[in-house]
Amino acid sequence: MKYITEYRDRNHAKALVEAIARAANDRPMTFMEVCGTHTMSLGRFGIRELLPENIRLISGPGCPVCVTPNAYLDHAIALARQPKTTICTFGDMMRVPGSTSSLEKERSQGADIRIVFSTLDALAIAREHPDRQIVFLGVGFETTAPTVATAIKTAANERIPNFSVLCAHKLVMPALEALLAGEVQLDGFLLPGHVSAIIGAKAYRPLLSRHRIAGAIAGFEPTDILEALFELIGQITHDDPKLTTAYVRAVTEEGNQRARALMEEIFEPTDAEWRGLGTIPASGLNIRKRYSSFDAAERFTIEVEPMREPKGCRCGEILQGRIAPTDCPLFGKNCTPTHPVGACMVSSEGTCAAYYKYRDA
């Protein structure tokens, strides 16, 4: 249990909460967590309720499934309807509503859609079924993009002709830029641990310096998050916004250079649409032309239905941090984990799902 129990120590957490209250005094501060796992941890451990009232935490676009627009879901559903085609996906994508259907509904009607636990599982299916087209849904931030890049390179090296990826990978840094240009006023960011392990701490420094905004990289256990919040409060009270790392056991200054090199080999930056944030320049990843034979968007010419957004869903505003899930009139009524209206209620990292699951915690 090393690296778990020591970061859930009750006495340490209590001391940090008390230190935060002293350091914050009565000054109002607003911080945004931009990682869906942080959102879940904040709810699971009741951290919001432990903080003084003048410290406000809001959720941002940290759930990759949630920021993936309906147009991508519609494209995946259209592919699933093609003959001799198998869709492979992580489980979070199954129940996300598209414009008129979902992957779960399509599977119930006979489509071959399989939940896998890694891109290598999808490659194995492609090897086992050479008579079928195997399409993996590449959704995620810098954390998962290297694994998808590995699968594409492996397929190229092994000449697996029936494997392809429908790519919707997103990059965190352009999203932070877009958030700072938006309407929500922030004092600092609680920055994602897993993404930071790939891109490195130094990736954030120019942005934070340019906007003079505080930032702290955090792990996912209670004392990880509380230590990062204490660091953020210290930066604000001392008028010294910068970057600190409260997750040094996993995050280095340089990050994972081999993973980034692999991503650069396979992918190239592209403008990408984010649910709630619109199109953000150079915020997505496209498969490079050298590997275009493994790009499902290039391989298949299909008709995709016109995109429609779910009526009354305010997921886009939630992803911008403009409102909390409880401000949406559908939350907990028309929209629940059993019958989700929007993506934020479906994903295990979704803000609405976290608020719903831990609302009585």
Image (tube, rainbow, N blue to C red):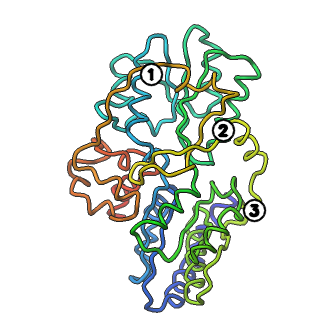
The answer to whether residue 223 is left or right of residue 323 is right
Estimate the x, y position of residue 336 in percent, counting from the top left: 28, 48
The three-letter code of the residue at mark 3 reads Thr
Estimate the x, y position of residue 330 in percent, counting from the top left: 22, 53
Identify whether 338 is placed above or below 356: above
- Disc 1 from disc 2: Cα separation: 22 Å
Disc 3 + disc 1, Cβ < 8 Å: no
Nearer-N-terminus badge (1/2): 1
Q: Which quarter of the picture shows residue 99?
A: top left
Residue of label 3: 252
Nearer-N-terminus badge (3/1): 1
* SS at mark 3 in the image: loop
Residue of label 2: 267
Residue of label 1: 79
* SS at mark 2 in the image: strand
| Quarter that holds the N terminus | bottom right
Identify whether 150 is placed above or below 237: above
